[in-house]
Structures are given as C-alpha cells and as structure tokens.
C-alpha cells in the first residue's frame, strides 16, 4: 500500500505540474490574443507612441499576472510593461514556451509570439504553481506518514492474529517436559496448516509420553525385581561368612561381595526414587520449619563426616522465619552435596555452608576446596550416572546423588545449580527453595 502511494504521488506530481504549466501557457496565449485585438489590424502603420498607449491600456489591468516585453527587429524595444521595472525578459532562441528565472521578479513562464514585425514576450509568475506543488508534497508526506503508521499497525495486528496459534504451540511445547508429558497443544476446529502442525506435534508428544512411560515402568519393575534375588544372595553370603571353616582370604572376598551388593542395593533404591519422582508418585511430608534449627542438626553429622575424612566443615545462617519443606528430603539433598564436596576437597580442606532466608527464598550455598568445574561440566553433573573424574573422590559413587537432589529441589518448586565462576578455586552448589508452597 505504501509503495503504491509513492508511485501515485510521483505520477500525480508530474501530471499536475504539467497540467498547471499548460494552463499558464493558455493564459499567456489568451493575453496575447487580447493584446493583438487591442492593437487592431492596422498596428503596422501606428507610431510607437500609439502602440505604447494601446498595449498599456490592454495590459495594465492584468499587471499582477503578466509581464509584457515587445521588441522589433534588431531587438529594438517598443514596449515594456511597468511591472518589469526596466528589466528585460530573456529570449531563448528556438523555444516558444519556456520557464526561466528573472532577477528581481523570480521564476516565470514565458510565451513568445510573433506579431510582424514584432516579437512579443508575455510572462506570468510560476510562484502560484510552485506553492501549489509544495502544498501537494506536504499533503503527500502527511499521507505517507499516516500510511506507514497504518500499515505498521495493521501488520502488527495481523501478525498478532496470525502468529497467535504459533505462540501458543511454542509456549505449550516449552512447558512440556519429562515431568509434564500429558499436556497437549490445543487444536482449532479449522482445518489449516497450523492445525495440522498442532495435530502432528500432539502425536509426537503422545509417542514421547508412551516412550517415557515405558522407560519409567521398566526401570521401576526392573529395580523391584532385582531387589529380591540380591537380598537372597546377601542372605547366603552372610550365612557363608558365619562358617568357621572359611579361610580368612575367603572371608575377605565374601566381605567385598557384601559391600558391592550393598552398593547395588543403594543404586536400585536411588533409581526407584528417581522413577517414582518422575512419575509424580513421591509425596512430600511438608511442614513449616526454622532453617537454623534444621541446619544445626545437620551440621552435627556434617562435622563428624568431615572430621572422619580429615576435612573441616563450618556453617552460618542469616535471616529469621520459617520455610515449608520436607525435613528428611532436604537433609538428603544436603548430605548428597556435602558428600561430593568432602570427596573432592584435599586433606585439611574446608567445606563451608552459608544459609540465607529472605521473604521469597531460602538459599543454601555449599563451597568445597576442590579444583572446580568448567561451565559445561557444572550442568552435566546433574545428569544421571555422570561421574566426571572418579579418581578425585570416592570411586564407589553411583552418579545419582545430584540428580536426586535436583529432583527433590524441583518437587519443592525450587532449583539447584553449580558454579565455579565466583569462588576462584572450588565449586559452589546453590540450593534455592521458595519460603512457601505457592
């Protein structure tokens, strides 16, 4: 629309200006005919004085519109209208009508006519035409601005209407995660490409949900089925260990097997918890607690664990109030993070816990004395079975502690993340829990 308006403006500007100039040419021609009629048929026999009187009589009444300059052979001037003030209208050889600027008068439109043996130049100002065209341009630019604004508003409105289904699809797709696979994109009754795309995405989410459900079901069933034979193996190994005829070397071997079976049992329990958490089957026992009391109880166990490993532990808390949490699950998160921090800290290293309670969040920060991690690894450590460098810590870890911690934080509508960017040496793990369940 804006492009069409611009094309129309240039075409209209050219045509209107040409039309107005042609009308000026007709006016000068009409003035010449009036002048010739005033002189009469015997103008060639008249004296210059009589010619001057007759022409002045015909032109004085229109002196605001026309300038008259009449000359004979050899450019002898016979007449000049008073409004020329002694000036001369330039005569362009070979042109009968033309536009020219005259000093002291301005731009004029000139018509040259022959009245043997005289040449008559009649000029009329072009200022009214220029003023009219300037007004035309002002109107055009006003219309162009309005058209641009209107086209922008219409385009924005159309984009809002047309792209609204796409934004709904995007928002729904963002909300659909492993813990929210049941939500679907709304499909309009109209059969168009967007509706077909929404239906296709919903079918893809159906297949994805079915796959996740099968994986979770398999993990839960497999974990449950493994516990029974492992319990029987553990029972037989314990009976074997009580046999006095067993040599010390064999007893050591049985002890190693019992430890490994215990480790496998812990992994199975952790997998069962993650499977139940993914399916929403874990119910939190929420109660309003004072963070300082919870941390004071946890700090006693943490200090013992740190001392046992030749490390140091210290903690602090700021803020007064209560927070709605599951005490047992939060202790599990703190213990998982603390265990990792103690494993990577050097002998005599310090693990510090800083807690802050605000009106919105309870934030717990645990910093170890280890070598730290790069940003990519800080995110990967929360994936299942990820153990970046077992040589730096306890090689018997399962790689499920931090994933379980993230699951518990998510169930509390909170979050957990790790960073090394603000601690220099070491890793900071931050747990953030809203102060209420809202």
Image (spheres, grey):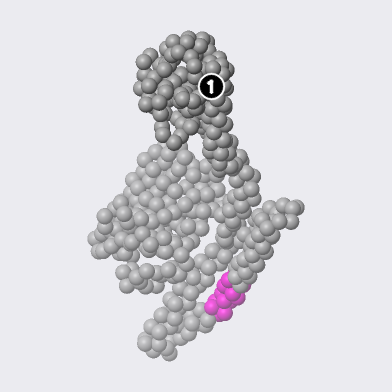
Q: Quadrant of residue 251?
A: bottom left
Identified at 40% across, 87% down, the residue is 250
Q: Is residue 173 left or right of residue 248?
A: right
* Residue furthest right in the image: 189
Pointer 1 residue: 32
Q: Position of residue 336 (x, y in %)?
A: 42, 60
The count of marks equals 1
Q: At which x and y percent is residue 363?
A: 41, 46
Residue placed at 44% from the left, 36% from the top?
94
Q: Residue at x 25, y 64 (%)?
A: 347
The front one of 141 and 327 is 141
In the picture, the quarter occupied by the C terminus is top right
Q: Is residue 228 magenta?
A: yes
Q: Tell me: residue 203, above or below residue 251.
A: above
Apparent side of residue 205 relative to residue 395 in the rendered image (left or right): right
Give the camera-side residue of 115 and 32.
115
Q: Is residue 304 magenta?
A: no
- Main SS, magenta region, reads helix
Q: Is residue 407 visible?
A: yes
- From where the camera sits, is residue 102 visible? no
x and y percent of residue 284 in the render?
Answer: 56, 53
Q: Quadrant of the N terminus?
A: top right
The percent position of residue 274, horizontal first and vertical second, equals: 54, 64
Q: Mark 1: which secondary structure?
A: helix
- Going 47% across and 10% down the picture, which residue do you hit? 50
| Residue toward you, 293 or 22 | 22
* Residue bounds of the magenta highlight: 219-232
- Within the image, what quadrant is residue 26 found in? top right
């Amino acid at each position: 629309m804006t492009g069409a308006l611009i094309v129309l403006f240039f075409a209209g500007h050219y045509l209107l200006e040409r039309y107005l100039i042609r009308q000026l040419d007709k006016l000068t021609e009409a003035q010449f005919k009036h002048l010739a009629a005033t002189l009469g048929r015997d103008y060639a026999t008249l004296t210059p004085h009589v010619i001057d009187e007759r022409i002045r009589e015909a032109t004085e009444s229109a002196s605001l519109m026309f300038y008259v300059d009449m000359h004979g052979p050899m450019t002898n001037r016979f007449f000049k209208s008073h409004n020329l003030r002694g000036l001369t209208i330039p005569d362009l050889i070979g042109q009968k009508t033309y536009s020219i600027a005259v000093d002291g008068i301005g731009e004029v439109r000139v018509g040259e006519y022959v009245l043997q043996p005289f040449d008559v130049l009649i000029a009329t100002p072009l200022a009214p035409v220029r003023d009219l065209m300037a007004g035309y341009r002002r109107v055009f630019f006003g219309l162009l601005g309005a058209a641009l604004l209107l086209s922008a508003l219409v385009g924005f409105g159309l984009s809002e209407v047309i792209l609204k289904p796409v934004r709904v699809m995007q928002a729904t797709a963002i909300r659909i995660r492993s813990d929210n696979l049941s939500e679907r994109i709304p499909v309009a009754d109209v059969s168009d490409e967007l509706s077909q795309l929404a239906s296709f995405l919903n079918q893809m989410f159906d297949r994805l949900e079915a796959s996740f459900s099968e994986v979770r079901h398999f993990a839960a069933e497999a974990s449950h089925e493994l516990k029974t034979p492992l319990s029987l193996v553990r029972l037989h190994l314990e009976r074997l260990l009580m046999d006095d005829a067993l040599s010390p070397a064999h007893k050591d071997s049985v002890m190693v097997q019992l430890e490994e079976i215990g480790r496998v049992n812990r992994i199975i329990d952790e997998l069962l918890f993650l499977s139940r958490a993914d399916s929403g089957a874990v119910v939190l026992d929420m109660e309003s607690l004072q963070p300082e009391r919870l941390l004071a109880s946890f700090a006693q166990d943490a200090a013992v664990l740190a001392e046992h490993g030749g490390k140091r532990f210290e903690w602090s808390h700021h803020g007064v109030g209560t927070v709605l949490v599951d005490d047992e699950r939060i202790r599990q998160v703190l213990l998982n993070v603390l265990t990792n921090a103690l494993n990577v800290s050097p002998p005599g290293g310090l693990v510090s816990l800083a807690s802050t309670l605000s009106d919105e969040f309870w934030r717990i920060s645990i910093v170890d004395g280890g070598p730290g991690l790069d940003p990519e690894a800080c995110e990967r450590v929360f994936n299942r079975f990820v153990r970046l460098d077992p040589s730096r810590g306890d090689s018997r870890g399962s790689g499920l502690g931090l994933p379980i911690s993230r699951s518990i934080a998510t169930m509390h509508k909170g979050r957990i993340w790790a960073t090394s960017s603000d601690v220099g040496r070491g890793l900071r793990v931050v747990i953030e829990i809203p102060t209420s369940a809202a």
